[in-house]
Image: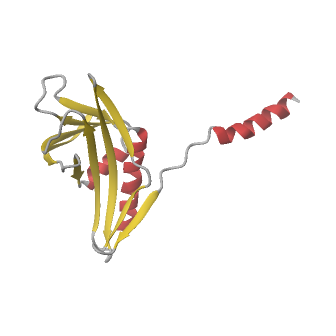
């Protein structure tokens, strides 16, 4: 009796502890630009708090392919929403698995506080890393508040990996 009950419990618990499905890729065609965009269905964000100010970082990896299928781009948009104010140009420092992966000087941020980074190798590296930090220096503030450092979530890293795999599949 006990072994039968145990088997039933194990069968039902398999569904409860099963891994969540991966984020899906959305395909959006833009005939006016002759481009097809591939993005994660759901974008993920991480949030930090410095004193009383909350800041959110949303990372969105994007694959863009021309209708002629010869042009192919893999880039990521980083959107920062903060009560600290806005900036037009600032650096972005990316650390992956304890190593300096990239220091991007004078990255341009648009009015919606979004920056575009178009380095496929960097995005691929993020997707295959276990721990990634993105740091945005804020030169107008005094230490330790002169930077915003975000640890990317496992979902954000999985999105980078998923979009790099899509990029590689389209490239072949």
> Does 1 appear above or below 122?
above
* Position in image of residue 132 (x %, y %): 32, 37
**Left or right, 168 with reference to 88:** right
Task: Give residue 114's position: percent from left, percent from top.
Answer: 24, 48
Q: Nearer the viewer, residue 87 or 62?
A: 87
Q: Residue, x 36% and y 55% (percent of image)?
A: 164
For residue 73, which quarter of the picture? bottom left
> Residue 63 lies in what quarter of the image?
bottom left
Identify the residue at horizontal 34%, vertical 50% (top origin).
60
From the top left corner, tell me how far across and down residue 146 is, in percent. Answer: 16, 28
Q: Quadrant of the N terminus?
A: top right
In the rendered image, the quadrant that contains the C terminus is bottom left
Query: Is residue 71 toward the left or the right of residue 22 in the image?
Result: left
Q: How is the image coloured?
A: secondary structure
What residue do we see at 27% from left, 46% from top?
Answer: 78
Vertical comparison of 103 with 62: above or below: above
Between residue 129 and residue 29, name the one nearer to us.
29
Relative to 5, 36 lies left or right: left
Question: Considering only vertical position in the picture, is 125 above or below 146?
Answer: below
């Amino acid at each position: 009796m006990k072994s039968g009950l145990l088997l039933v419990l194990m069968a039902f618990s398999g569904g409860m502890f099963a891994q969540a499905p991966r984020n899906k890729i959305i395909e959006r065609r833009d005939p006016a630009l002759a481009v097809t965009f591939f993005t994660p269905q759901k974008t993920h964000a991480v949030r930090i708090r410095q004193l009383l100010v909350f800041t959110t970082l949303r990372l969105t990896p994007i694959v863009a392919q021309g209708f002629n299928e010869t042009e192919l781009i893999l880039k990521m948009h980083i959107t920062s929403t903060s009560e600290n104010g806005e900036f037009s140009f600032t650096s972005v420092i990316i650390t992956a698995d304890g190593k300096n992966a990239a220091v991007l000087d004078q990255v341009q941020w648009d009015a919606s506080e979004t920056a575009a980074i178009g380095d496929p190798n960097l995005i691929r590296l993020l997707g295959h890393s276990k721990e990634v930090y993105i740091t945005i220096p804020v030169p107008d503030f005094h230490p330790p508040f002169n930077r915003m450092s975000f640890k990317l979530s496992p979902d954000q890293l999985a999105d980078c990996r998923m979009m790099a795999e899509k990029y590689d599949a389209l490239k072949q």
